[in-house]
């Protein structure tokens, strides 16, 4: 069997798990296709990479794709030897069975080269260093005099003026030369291990574990765990379980919450979870009715949807700033009277002034405003800064918020919550038959990704369908809060 070439992405897969590398190399179809959220990550990476290259006008782009590796290698060699370009984008290098394409390769004024790895984040992360280290190993092994290595990220302090992106201010270089050089022997050893493994007759036998999620979620996890028989209520359902206590339970062979002995140290919430699981019933603590009695009529229910563009789009914003583009409000004026209003910004300008204007009209000046988590308060505070002429009204709205999440977390636990107080987990338990499974958009990350995709789309029908799906999802969130409040009110003390 011919051993496949390692790329930097495959090297990183193998650094996480040799089985993941095996699947990447031989059975890629075992991974599901990227969903809208993951595709949005890829799209953002391409956009950030393109702009990072624009910082170097006149650079040479090696355009050959993965099907034309020899052409890419030859073009890279030719351009470097000719000395006609001070910067190369996507140059190709191969050394001892490892092929890499470098995002940005700069010729240094004093001689030698700097390799730059572009990341669509706003900070340097430790996981970026092995990525650079394997590239440094390949380039130097191929004979290139690389003297510096850097990770290029977005600069979270940069504020867009709304007129022109200042690319030099938008990006920042983080030197990782010393860190990458310190890993060179490790890279060599791991490359040898990976190539030997790939040359073997069968996939390595590696059991699922914590490595499946560190540093990235493995796309083959569902395949690797297809035959696993999970505990009915595993210890992973204990909220905020400290790693040391998890290890202690595992060392004692305890997988089920119901098997945790009474003397084992747990937090008060974890103790409630254990009791609910052991007794297979809901646990009610305190007076839920008195909590809900603090709601002043008419009760409003508010939910925002937001997105975080990596490249700032609106004046006064910075990379990855959270921008509300949509809200839904249900208003309950009497037990049988329910009104709904919403707003979704369908245009490519700053949605925040429009969101604020419509929101102020939607919630009026009277009644409590129910939310599920503190997120809406955070967004209202941010909107008050972004739209200062309406800050007083937004502050007043924020003062009327009533969070349902702490009520449930403090007062009620059901075994079917499975350790999570997410509205997606709580809703079908307290309101049987109600959920999100019938919607095209059923979570916030997908909503954000779909909105960004709609803004880029030139297909009018596709845009409108996406906007309709987003409205349905946001409306479901606020209707869910209405039904949750009603269900909580019906729980006997």
Image (tube, rainbow, N blue to C red):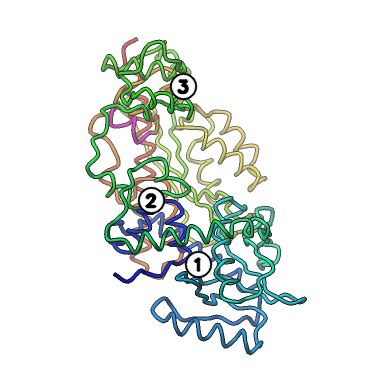
Q: Which mark is residue 295?
A: 3
* Residue neighbourhood size for the residue with mark 1, other residues' Cα within 10 Å, grouped as few (<14), some (14–19), many (≥20): some
Q: Position of residue 160 (x, y in %)?
A: 66, 60
Confirm whether the magenta stretch covers residue 424: yes
First-in-chain label (3 vs 2):
2
Q: Position of residue 96 (x, y in %)?
A: 48, 71
Span colored in magenta: 423-429
Mark 2 vs 1: CB contact within 8 A: no
Q: Quadrant of residue 341?
A: top left
Image height of 476 relative to 205, above or below: above
Q: Residue at x 26, y 17 (%)?
A: 280
Q: Is residue 200 visible?
A: yes
What's the CA distance linking mark 2 and mark 1? 21 Å
Decide which of 44, 60 is in the foreground and name it.
Answer: 60
Principal secondary structure, stretch drawn in magenta: helix
Q: Secondary structure at mark 3?
A: loop
Label 3 vs label 1: CA separation? 47 Å
- Identify the residue position indicated by label 1 in the image: 46
């Amino acid at each position: 069997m011919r051993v496949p070439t390692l790329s930097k992405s495959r090297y990183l897969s193998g650094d996480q798990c040799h089985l993941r590398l095996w699947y990447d190399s031989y059975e890629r179809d075992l991974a599901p296709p990227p969903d809208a959220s993951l595709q949005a990550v890829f799209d953002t990476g391409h956009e950030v990479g393109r702009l990072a290259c624009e910082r170097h006008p006149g650079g040479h782009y090696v355009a050959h794709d993965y099907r034309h590796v020899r052409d890419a290698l030859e073009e890279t060699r030719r351009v470097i030897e000719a000395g006609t370009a001070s910067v190369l984008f996507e140059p190709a290098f191969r050394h001892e069975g490892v092929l890499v394409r470098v995002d940005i390769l700069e010729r240094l004024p004093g001689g030698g080269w700097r390799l730059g790895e572009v990341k669509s984040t706003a900070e340097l992360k430790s996981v970026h260093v092995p990525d650079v280290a394997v590239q440094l190993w390949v380039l130097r092994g191929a004979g290139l005099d690389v003297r510096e290595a850097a990770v290029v990220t977005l600069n979270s302090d940069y504020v867009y003026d709304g007129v022109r992106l200042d690319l030099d201010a938008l990006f920042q270089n983080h030197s990782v030369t010393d860190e990458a050089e310190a890993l060179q022997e490790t890279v060599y050893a791991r490359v040898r291990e990976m190539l030997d493994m790939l040359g073997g007759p069968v996939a390595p036998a590696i059991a699922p574990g914590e490595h499946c999620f560190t540093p990235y979620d493995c796309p083959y996890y569902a395949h690797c765990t297809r035959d696993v028989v999970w505990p009915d209520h595993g210890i992973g359902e204990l909220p905020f379980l400290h790693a040391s206590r998890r290890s202690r339970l595992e060392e004692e062979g305890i997988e089920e919450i119901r098997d945790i002995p009474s003397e084992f140290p747990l937090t008060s919430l974890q103790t409630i979870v254990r009791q609910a699981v052991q007794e297979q019933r809901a646990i009610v603590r305190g007076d839920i009715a008195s909590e809900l009695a603090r709601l002043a009529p008419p009760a409003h229910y508010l939910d925002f949807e937001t997105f975080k563009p990596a490249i700032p789009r609106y004046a006064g914003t910075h990379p990855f700033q959270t921008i509300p583009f949509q809200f839904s409000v249900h208003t309950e004026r009497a037990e049988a009277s329910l009104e709904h209003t919403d707003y979704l910004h369908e245009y490519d300008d700053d949605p925040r002034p429009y969101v604020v204007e419509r929101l102020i009209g939607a919630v009026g000046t009277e009644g409590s405003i129910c939310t599920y988590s503190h997120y809406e308060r955070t967004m209202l505070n941010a909107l008050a800064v972004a739209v200062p002429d309406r800050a007083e009204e937004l502050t007043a709205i924020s003062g009327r918020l009533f969070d349902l999440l702490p009520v449930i977390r403090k007062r009620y636990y059901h075994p079917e919550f499975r350790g999570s107080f997410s509205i997606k987990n709580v809703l079908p338990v307290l309101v049987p038959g109600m959920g999100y499974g019938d919607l095209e958009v059923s979570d916030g990350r997908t909503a954000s990704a779909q909105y960004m995709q709609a803004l880029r789309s030139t297909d009018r029908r596709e845009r409108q369908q996406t906007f309709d799906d987003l409205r349905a999802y946001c409306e479901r969130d606020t209707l869910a809060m209405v039904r949750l409040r009603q269900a909580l009110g019906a729980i006997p003390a």
